[in-house]
């Protein structure tokens, strides 16, 4: 389809502003731009149709099954959108006086209270804008804690090799040396490797539990105890909180601080890549290190972005928390776990799970044997799913499983959807044996065929140019 | 309600299919002593109508002002209806990051168009797909400018306090030094900057217009920075770029800014939009997602996430940043805003912002005891002295007007195209009335 710039007609426009009713101010010549930006010139109907056409080329959670592992693509309730759009929230200036923003404060305080209860934490901030940003905030809590005690020798953060890429990247952004420890074959922490990595230079450990292969680490209390004994702190990556909320609390597992992706666990929409929002929680002894805004609050604290965070996303998450309540939170977690186990067992017998045991909210299929046999890779299977209107699972992650497909159905999928999805996996399993070539060339019915990614990187075209 | 569609009967059937008796058995790996043995201390589940009442009641506790004369990093502009309706479309709203290009061309193309518009606004060659906000964009820019030998970051003291503090925090993270260049008459002190541009300085950041609304002499600052071998970063208000010289024309190596004015609501501070653009030469240092054009197996034009070798999921601890999620839907909103304004509309909005702010300034400074604090050209914000500040601000609030922000030396006022002459006249009249008492 055409780019918006290719639809532009000189002189066309939307009538949006009234005539200026005061005298225009003169901008000194040295400050003036010489040529106007080449923005498109369109009528409102052109715009509406252009974006509707684009929107038809997007797969949202509302379009169909989206089992993208580790991303928790659950349904995003519409009521949460309506409430976030209330003028009483959307129109509030972040620097309005305390008397004028009591409702916003109530949203933040209430959400903080509930999330502290769910995680077993005692302090909470909503300043970070996304999960990785929350990791940055949380690891800075650890850094400040050690620095304040004058314990400057603690320069290392331990990260299992099964961790999300953001974990080591975060530790590096916080000035720590990353100690990658190998995982046990089941993706859980190898206690011996952990012990070998711990020492007087350990600042902390970053861990996801359930881990990135979807298993709950049964040694978790031992793990956090070992880290604490060595003088380090334990950071909980809340990417997988959806499996355990209301069932077991990170605070009770021995973690000192945690981040939660509100756009995963608490059902706020992903927006094609953002905005997310993040809550970072901590135990009481770390509260003094939480971030604040220099302008809204007071100087002297760390600060990871302007103002108080992605507030309107927090409104959505609070609406969701209130909807689920004390009964719905564990119900969501339990059914997320049930759906994952059900789907895994339904697929099993064709593609095999990497770990043949009860999983948490997600599981990993290991296609290495299948690839050897048929030549059909995890990528080929993923691309084939697109032809059925299913979003592919996360591919080639975690790196400790080869030819991995990671599926996270979430609790908001029905039994019928899971049965349908399992059926398709089983059909593709058979198809790959009969006609691998067909699958190498998938998708066949999608918006586009497979793109040439090498060309995109070698001869980068990163913007439209006026012909 | 938990939005779980399966019926109780189906759940039992599924538990049996998995081979367990109950949910407890699904959590068999969790040590018994750790399981929460009580209900969460949260209110009971609510129906949609009850939630709507509860949350609306919170919104009702905020004051809604009919006129907002406060800016300081969050600006009250007119948001066209289409700018609200398009990003609310459920597919744009609920999709994930476009990892699967074959079913995400709509998101990818919209980002490619956004990147182009940001390049057009800033005069730059490459834009990323967005970062969290203007403050993190400034911090990421500082990080991308550092090299092994040049580690120190300079920032103008006339930048937004939250931006300075955020950059300081990112520097604290990596253990690098941030030095704040002093302010003279409301602008960056050029002489002080020259002295501070030592051989270990990686970059200097200036905000245009600055926190006090003043226009900095960006060309001269850039020349000084380049003469010292450092990189020049400009933080720009995107609406002002409808009339102001582009950062590239001012010599900037990296242009960043807060995209909120481009159709995003005030929203008590977020979600907002950080934009980042640079020259082709520096493109491999740019953090975050970037969309590129390519062709598919059939030779058709299409779009993909590209240059991913910079990113955390490939590079892990060696990545240029840990950023993963960005503000894609806000970038889409900004694109729709820029597309419906067009070049003429954006220029008109910028000129009206300037016109209204100058009108407000003239009206206020005609009053006894109200004086402009800093000399020099400004865009849509300015600082005045104001006697009996608290009294004046509460009198304005009583009339539904949010007055300027108290800052050191006075009040920082802002006006945009959204305020009519009548609204500004009313605000001036209220101030006059209080001061006349």
Image (spheres, coloured by chain):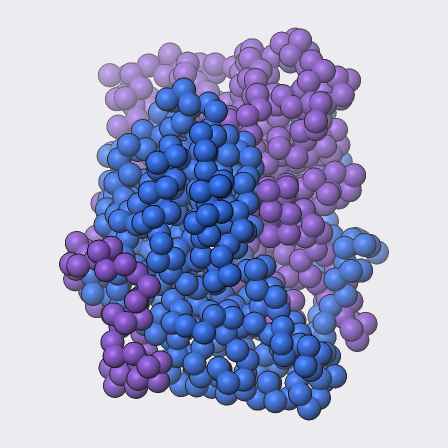
Chain colours: A blue, B purple
Percent position (x, y) of residue B196?
64, 12
Percent position (x, y) of residue B96?
52, 62
Please say whether residue A13 is visible from this viewpoint: no
In this view, B355 is above or below B361: below
Please say whether residue B15 is visible from this viewpoint: yes
The quadrant in which the C terminus of chain A is found is: bottom right
- State the residue in front, A326 or A195: A195
The quadrant in which the N terminus of chain A is found is: bottom right
- State the residue in front, B155 or B174: B174
Residue at 44 percent across and 84 percent down: it is A346
In this view, B374 is above or below A361: above
Percent position (x, y) of residue A331?
26, 68
In this view, A414 is above or below A185: below
Residue at 38 percent across and 66 percent down: it is A360
Along the horizontal axis of the image, is B129 left or right of A289?
Answer: right
- State the residue in front, B46 or A266: A266
Residue at 23 percent across and 60 percent down: it is B32
Quadrant of the rendered image containing residue A206 = top left
- State the residue in front, A92 or A323: A323
Percent position (x, y) of residue B415?
47, 33
Residue at 28 percent across and 32 percent down: it is A285
Quadrant of the rendered image containing residue B277 = top right
Quadrant of the rendered image containing residue A81 = bottom left
Along the horizontal axis of the image, is B208 left or right of B32?
Answer: right
**Looking at the image, how many numbered discs can be counted on the residues?**
0
């Amino acid at each position: 389809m055409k780019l918006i710039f290719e639809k532009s007609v000189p002189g066309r426009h939307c009538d949006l502003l009234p005539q200026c009713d005061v005298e225009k101010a003169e901008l000194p010549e040295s400050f003036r731009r010489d040529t106007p930006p080449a923005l498109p010139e369109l009528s409102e109907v052109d715009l509406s149709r252009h974006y509707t056409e684009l929107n038809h080329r997007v797969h949202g959670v509302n379009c169909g099954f989206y089992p993208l592992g580790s991303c928790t693509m659950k349904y995003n309730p519409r009521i949460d959108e309506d409430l976030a759009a209330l003028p009483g929230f959307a129109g509030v200036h972040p620097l309005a006086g305390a008397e004028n923003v009591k409702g916003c404060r109530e949203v933040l305080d209430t959400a903080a209270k509930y999330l502290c209860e769910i995680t077993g934490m005692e302090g909470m901030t909503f300043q970070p804008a996304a999960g990785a940003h929350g990791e940055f905030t949380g690891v800075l809590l650890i850094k400040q804690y050690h620095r304040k005690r004058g314990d400057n020798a603690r320069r290392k953060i331990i990260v299992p090799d099964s961790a999300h890429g953001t974990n080591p990247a975060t530790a590096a952004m916080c000035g720590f040396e990353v100690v990658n420890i190998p995982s046990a074959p089941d993706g859980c922490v190898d206690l011996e490797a952990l012990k070998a990595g711990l020492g007087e230079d350990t600042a902390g450990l970053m861990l996801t539990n359930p881990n990135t292969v979807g298993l709950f680490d049964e040694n978790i209390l031992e793990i956090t105890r070992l880290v604490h004994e060595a003088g380090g702190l334990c950071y909980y990556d809340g990417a997988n909180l959806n499996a355990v909320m209301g069932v077991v609390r990170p605070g009770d597992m021995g973690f000192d601080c945690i981040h939660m992706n509100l756009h995963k666990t608490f059902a706020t929409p992903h927006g094609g890549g953002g905005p997310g929002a993040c809550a970072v929680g901590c135990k009481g002894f770390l509260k003094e290190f939480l971030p604040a805004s220099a302008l809204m609050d007071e100087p002297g604290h760390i600060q990871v972005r302007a103002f108080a965070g992605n507030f309107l996303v927090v409104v959505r998450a609070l609406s969701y928390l209130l909807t689920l309540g004390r009964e719905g939170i564990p119900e969501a977690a339990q059914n997320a776990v049930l759906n994952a186990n059900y789907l895994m067992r339904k697929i099993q017998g064709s593609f095999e799970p990497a770990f043949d045991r009860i999983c948490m909210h997600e599981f990993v299929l290991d296609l290495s044997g299948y690839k050897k046999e048929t030549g059909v890779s995890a990528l080929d299977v993923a691309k084939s799913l697109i032809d059925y209107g299913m979003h592919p699972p996360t591919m080639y992650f975690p790196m400790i499983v080869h030819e991995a497909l990671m599926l996270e159905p979430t609790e908001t999928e029905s039994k019928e959807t899971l049965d349908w999805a399992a059926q398709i996996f089983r059909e593709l399993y058979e198809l790959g044996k009969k006609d691998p070539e067909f699958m190498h060339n998938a998708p066949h019915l999608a918006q586009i065929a497979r793109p040439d990614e090498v060309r995109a990187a070698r001869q980068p075209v990163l913007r439209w140019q006026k012909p | 309600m938990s939005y779980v569609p399966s019926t109780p009967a189906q759940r039992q059937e599924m538990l049996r299919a998995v081979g367990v008796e109950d949910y407890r058995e699904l959590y068999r790996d969790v040590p018994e002593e750790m399981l929460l043995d009580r209900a969460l201390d949260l209110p009971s589940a609510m129906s949609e109508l009850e939630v709507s009442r509860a949350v609306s009641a919170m919104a009702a506790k905020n004051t809604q002002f009919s006129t907002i004369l406060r800016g300081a990093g969050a600006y009250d502009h007119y948001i066209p209806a289409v700018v609200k309706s398009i990003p609310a479309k459920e597919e744009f709203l609920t999709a994930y990051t476009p990892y699967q290009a074959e079913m995400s061309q709509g998101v990818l193309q919209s980002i490619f168009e956004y990147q182009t518009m940001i390049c057009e606004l800033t005069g730059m060659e490459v834009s990323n797909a967005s970062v969290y906000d203007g403050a993190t964009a400034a911090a990421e820019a500082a990080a991308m400018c550092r090299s092994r030998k040049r580690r120190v970051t300079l920032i103008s003291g006339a930048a937004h306090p939250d931006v300075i503090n955020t950059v300081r925090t990112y520097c604290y993270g990596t253990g690098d030094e941030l030095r704040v260049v002093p302010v003279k008459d409301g602008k960056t002190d050029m002489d002080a900057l020259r002295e501070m541009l030592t051989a270990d300085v990686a970059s200097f950041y200036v905000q245009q217009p600055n926190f006090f609304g003043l226009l900095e002499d960006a060309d001269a600052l850039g020349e000084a920075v380049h003469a010292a071998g450092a990189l020049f970063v400009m933080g720009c208000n995107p609406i002002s770029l409808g009339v102001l010289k582009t950062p590239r024309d001012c010599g900037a190596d990296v242009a960043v800014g807060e995209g909120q004015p481009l159709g995003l609501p005030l929203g008590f501070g977020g979600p907002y939009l950080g934009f980042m653009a640079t020259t082709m030469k520096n493109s491999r240092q740019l953090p975050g997602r970037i969309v590129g054009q390519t062709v598919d197996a059939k030779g058709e034009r299409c779009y993909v996430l590209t240059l991913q070798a910079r990113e955390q999921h490939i590079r892990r601890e060696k990545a240029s940043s840990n950023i993963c999620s960005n503000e894609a839907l806000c970038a889409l909103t900004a694109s729709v805003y820029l597309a419906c304004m067009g070049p003429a509309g954006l220029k008109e909005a910028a000129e009206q912002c300037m016109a209204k702010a100058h009108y407000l300034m003239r009206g206020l400074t005609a009053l006894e005891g109200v004086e402009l604090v800093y000399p020099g050209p400004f865009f849509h914000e300015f600082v005045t002295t104001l006697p009996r500040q608290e009294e004046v601000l509460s009198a304005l609030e009583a009339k539904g007007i949010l007055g300027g922000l108290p800052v050191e030396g006075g009040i920082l006022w802002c006006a945009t195209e959204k305020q009519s002459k009548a609204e500004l006249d009313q605000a001036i009249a209220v101030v006059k009335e209080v001061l006349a008492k």
